[in-house]
Amino acid sequence: MKKRQVVVKKDCSSGRSSSTTSSSVVRTVRYAECQKNHAANIGGYAVDGCREFMASGEDGSNGALSCAACGCHRNFHRREVETEVVCEYSPPNSRR
């Protein structure tokens, strides 16, 4: 399951120049292997081997937070965040 968060920030400099700088940040969140310790109550350590979170239901439903493969809550899965920053710059218009 991939979730995406997009943040767009525009910065326009004031004064004589009319240059424009805009940047956007794209964050992709992925939930990897399950880290729930199923043997914690007896003092051991055992994980179930679930390699990736797969939502049981659609986004916004109760099933979206439980894994279809192992039944654990999404919080037990390791969270990986990938961030990509894209900057665009347009130089000021030159008048002569």
Image (cartoon, grey):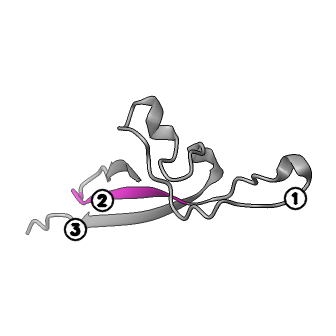
- Residue annotated with mark 2: 21
Percent x, y for residue 19?
24, 60
Q: Secondary structure at mark 3?
A: loop
The residue type indicated by label 3 comes to Pro
Mark sitting on residue 91: 3
| Callout 1 amino acid | Gly
Residue 25 shown left or right of residue 75 in the figure: left
Q: Quadrant of residue 50?
A: bottom right
Mark 2 crowdedness (10 Å alpha carbons): few <14, some 14-19, many ≥20: some
Q: Position of residue 49 (x, y in %)?
A: 62, 64
Q: Secondary structure at mark 2?
A: strand
Who comes first in sequence, dot 2 or dot 3? Answer: 2
Which residue lies under the disc numbered 1?
44
Disc 1 crowd rating (10 Å Cα; few below 14, some 14-19, many 20+) is few
**Whole-percent x, y for residue 47 in the image:** 71, 60
Q: Residue furthest right?
A: 43
The residues tagged by marks 1 and 2 sit, at their Cα atoms, a distance apart of 55 Å
Secondary structure at badge 1 equals: loop
**Distance between mark 2 and mark 3 Cα atoms:** 9 Å
Residue 71 lies in quadrant: top right
The reply to whether the C-beta atoms of the residues labelled 3 and 1 are less than 8 Å apart is no
Depth-wise, is mark 1 or mark 2 nearer the camera?
Answer: 1
Label 3 crowd bin: few (<14), some (14–19), many (20+), radius 10 Å: few
Q: Which residues are magenta?
A: 17-32
Q: Is residue 33 above or below residue 77?
A: below
Query: Residue flagged by tag 2: what amino acid is it?
Result: Thr
